Image: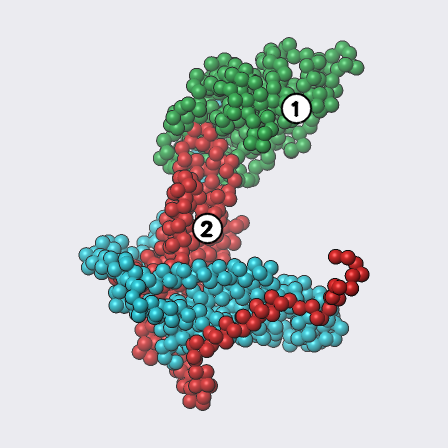
Chain colours: A cyan, B red, C green
Amino acid sequence: MNVAAIDAAAALPLRDPDARRRLGGALLAIVLLWPLLQLAEFRPAALLDASNLRVIGNFLAGFLPPATDAEFLGLLVRATLETLAIATAGITLALFLAAPLAVVATRALSVSAIGPGPGRWRGQALRAACRAILTVLRAIPEIVWALMFVRVLGLGPAAGVLALAITYGGMLGKVYTEILESTDTRPARALLAAGSGRLAALAYGLVPNAAQELTSYTVYRWECAVRASVIMGFVGAGGLGQLMDQSMKMLNGGEASSILLVFLLLVLLADAISAVLRRALA
Amino acid sequence: MKSGDDTCPPAGPADFCLSCLLGGAALLLAIVASFAWLDIDFTALATRESAAAMGDFVASFFPPDLAPDFLRKVALGSVQTFAVAAVGTLLAAALGMLVALPAAGRLGAPARALARFALNLLRSVPELVWATLMVLAAGLGPFAGTLALMLHTIGVLGRLFAEAIENAPPAPESSLREAGGGGTVAFVYGTLPLVWPQVIAYSLYRLEMNIRMAAVLGFVGAGGLGQMLYFHLSIFQQAQAATVLMAMLLLVLVVDSLSHLVRGRLAG
Amino acid sequence: MAFATHHLGLEHANGLRALHGLDLRLAAGERVAVIGPSGAGKTSLIRLLGCALRPTAGRIELLGHNPWQLSARELRRLRARIGTIHQAPPIPPRLRVITAILAGRLGSWPAWKGLASLLYPADIAGARAALARLDLADRLFDRCDRLSGGQLQRVGIARVLYQQPQLILADEPVSALDPMLADAALGQIVADAEQRGAAVLASLHAVDLALKWFPRVIGLRNGEVAFDLPAGDVSNEMLGELYASEGRVVPTQANDPALLRALGGPDPQAAPRLVRIDSCRGQG
């Protein structure tokens, strides 16, 4: 640390070595961003367009007061109950799909893994096939399934229930598989090694430990299903969503705000029920 | 409990949980009531005619339309969907960070409550509902989709960012304030570098979700692959719809892998 | 006048009394070291002097102002003139060294300059000069999480040197440095203060460093001033009293036999035991 060295060091004009890379990155970002903005037809001025302002202005003006006439409230209550029913029925069917697939797909119930014994490749292939099925079930968003089912089955809740059954079956199946594998598998393996059947090993070995996590996740998925049911309604699958779609198509702001309020309350309610159930299970 | 007291029933198979039984019964009741309310005619679904109709419907998707002209349209739709998701997420990350500052308490308690309420409101309304509103405000097309994604994602990211900021150690920022720095620079030099990795991770994760949403928003007129899918299904052109579906799956796969890659590189 | 305290006291929320009845005065350009056992209140004193905490009793005057009666803007300006060297520099790990050092002048720069400096550093030469004094100039553009604990501590010192405050407060600034580097770093702090006429208050764990570099020494014990004397007047008896709670073991760092002998005194029985502490936090 002598003075000469300090002076020499201070005399050297230094450039920031990262500066060039940062500048290059910034230019690249701009070059990529510009066409993206064009493609997305990003035109903030459209928000201030006179005709658009009139439409949204009238609509928002109709927001208050929210529609409260008796006939509409009747429709609202029926739609809410329908949404809840779609979610519950959909999850139930999803369970019928998910549970068997998860039981076959989980490594925790593999008899051939003990040893390892014979039939390992067959077991692995079977498990891989089940996991592939579960992935495929999950790949397409439920609203797309709903749209397709509406084309075949017509408007109404059936499309929503089936769509939920398929996609949520895939989701539940995948998570059940993981839960079964992440809990303590020794009791199940001990039972299998002693020659018990797989279902017995599942019931006595795995389920007691995993039950809480399994039910907790299922309740959480039910809560998601309530929201998904509303969204699928927009393509004609019944419930609050279909009601709101109709109201918005008629530019009825009062009805839309009522439905929105009820939807927010419903989500809160589902959230509360879910929290209570999960705490009760803990 | 006194030991050897024979008024205590012995523990064993007879021991069951009454509340569990009641709970289970209530659950079963709810499920049966749901199916009853919906009144879905499952038997009609199981008839030979409806099975045949389903079969025909599924068969009509194959083979998918792979004509070069149509593929070009689908490719354009894919890029448009990606653009909607990317621009929406980018704007949401920037604006979300701005709202996260009051939501983390940097501007006082009343501002915090207001910001958190606004974020919750933005979050609770589903993207599709925002999209129907934005179609009214900005007209049909991808811009409405971008706005819808942006609004919803501000709610999600804003809350995540606010929590990250509140959980960050306060020492770097407070030491800069104690050396005379103003609020903005103290935050940018002190806390932002601490939460930056989380900001990027959350934003990329949200981009993956938004790609899926962007495809679907087209159903209400927000352009991209969704609008194409809705259109072709409405006029019963299943072969074209199949191509669009495949493009959706491919897009999701590509974006998921890219996002994975970027996150892996940033973590290193 | 650098600072003056009248009956300064600090009581923590849980009732623990950190400081009590401190009447201290430091003239402009003066240097003083604060020594004492752990828990004596050294860090609390530095935080009070740095306007990081409000005193619960008494008054404090910094650079001629009562900080807690100033407006927010005036308080900011006052704080910019006081620099605190922390024992563990609160620097985000992802930050580069140059940004950490330039942050020292955020108090005097306008906000736009502080933000623009993130895009391209505003004063590379100045930061380099500050870092070169601590023999770390070659790490100027490295990320702080690539530095060892001792190197990071030197970056914290460089930040305050770059800030050029009128009052330097140092809370165990060389605790993570090995003896030679610690001595050299303290020398740089003292030289910088002398050159600019700044006042220095440093709390130090190693007594020999305190006696070597500072003409005035304050002994703090249980939150009260045990003694406040010129360095030459500090006797072994006083040191032993001061560190009585730690078995009369007086911590030192240097391996200077003459100094150790001097501290040892003529009567080995009555003399406090001297222990050399090797920095176990790496070669800094």
Where residue A66 appears, as percent x and y from the top left, is 30, 60
Q: Residue at x 66, y 68 (%)?
A: B16
Where residue A215 appears, as percent x and y from the top left, is 57, 65
Q: Residue at x 45, y 89 (%)?
A: B48
Where residue B247 appears, as percent x and y from the top left, is 40, 69
Residue at the front extreme, as displayed: B7
**Hey, which quadrant is residue A39 in on the image?**
bottom left
Chain identifier of the residue bearing label 1 in the image: C
Q: Nearer the viewer, residue A253 or A217?
A: A253
**Hey, which quadrant is residue A16 in on the image?**
top left
Q: Which residue is mark 2?
A: B160
Q: Quadrant of the N terminus of chain A?
A: top right
Task: Please state if B10 lies on the left or on the right of C46 as rendered.
Answer: right
How far apart are labels 1 and 2 at the CA level?
44 Å
Task: Please state if C278 lies on the left or on the right of B73 as rendered.
Answer: right
Q: Quadrant of the C terminus of chain A?
A: bottom right
